[in-house]
Amino acid sequence: MAIIVVILIIWAVSSKSPSTTPTSTEPIKVASLLSLTGGASAWGENAKKGIELATEEINNAGGINGRQIQMIYEDTASDPKRTVSVFQHATGIEKVTAIIGPLNQTETASVIPLIEQTQIPSIAPGFLPVQNRTNLSNPVLIWTDAESESGQLAEYVYNQGIRKVGVIGTLDAWEQTVTNAFVDKFKALGGNVTDVEVVQPSASDMKLPVTKVLATKPEAIYFGTYYQFVNSSKEVHNLGFKGKLYGIEVDDYLAGETSQWTEGLQFIAPDYYATDFIKKFTDKFGVAPGMPAGQSYDSANILFSFLKKSTDQKEILEAMKDFKEYQGTSGKLTISSDGRSHLPLAVFQLNGGKVSKIESLK
């Protein structure tokens, strides 16, 4: 009788196990929300390449517990309204497990309510001020804190002996942040900000604002802008300014576009690259990585590290709460207790359209 009971128990367990512990071979869907067209398309394409490289590496290594990553790229077109639309498509139609992106500060702000509503894990190689975030652990933000970065550049400029700076920025959210933070810090150090000109990101003529800045006789110009970097720096050159030039996060595209008139310009950006990322990227795409390829590559790998532990969204969100540091392409990323992300920073210089590092900052 005992033997019969044992046999029945074994049969019952074995007959139920396939349905209670299924082994899925379906791909894991992840959406990347990137600015592939519009004003920030150069950044979006760099980000896409970084994510492609990370995805290829994880899939070639067997995927996540035998499941391949299916990366779905959604174009935000640098537009917050479109960002909301593609977010809804990714989560509602594609039923993705997680999101990478967006890149742009305004785009990120536009989907914060949706991230909170859907509770979908999100890793963004972007920045958003902590005061604009409802949840400091979702999304995980990989881009270095813009206010801290701009403050460090202001200190660097002041320590170079510069005391009078003219500033050019735009009404883009991130560019307003880096402009205001630089101005506030430079003034706090005892410097004189002679003029601040803030224009629309799409402005076509920068002659008037640049003329106003130069009329105040600054020793240096700070470009707190990506959108108007080309136009404003060209006007500064055309109007014969001979002082120092400074900027923030100038990539290879901007360096090449302005090579004839930004010789010697110094800028601050995350220090790159601390790993063999440049070689891997160049071998695959035939070009050197520009910003934010490294941060996007790290974003993908951070997400994959969560997925290796669990593909359950609730469990991923719990793991994200404990995420505090990561050794990535630009060195050690740390997230402080107040939710700010920090990366090692460096000062770079433009020479002949090429970027070279001057010094790493502490």
Image (cartoon, grey):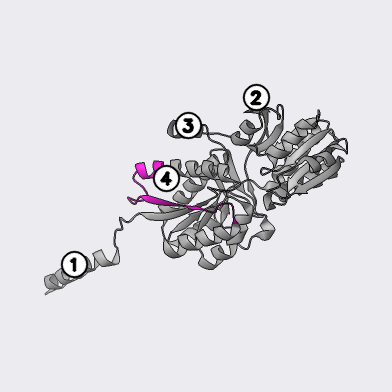
Q: Residues within 10 Å of mark 4 (few under 14, many from 20)?
A: many
Q: Secondary structure at mark 1?
A: helix
Which circle, 1 or 4, is nearer the viewer? 4
Q: Earlier in the sequence, mark 3 or mark 1?
A: 1
Which residue type carries mark 4?
Answer: Thr
Residue behind mark 4: 55
Question: Given the image, on which type of amino acid does mark 1 rest?
Answer: Ile
Rounded to the nearest angstrom, the CA distance separating label 4 from label 2 is 34 Å
Residue type at tag 3: Thr
Q: Mark 2 touching mark 1, by CB under 8 A?
A: no
Q: Which residue is mark 1?
A: 10
Separation of disc 1 and disc 4 at Cα?
42 Å
The mark lying in front, picked from 3 and 2, is 2
Closer to viewer: mark 3 or mark 1 = 3
Task: Give the quadrant of residue 158.
Answer: top right
Q: Is residue 22 left or right of residue 246?
A: left
User: Which stretch did the figure color magenta?
Assistant: 55-79
In the image, farthest residue toward the bottom: 1
**Are discs 3 and 1 less than 8 Å apart at CB?**
no
Q: In 3D space, how far apart are the residues under numbered discs 3 and 2 (Cα atoms)?
A: 21 Å
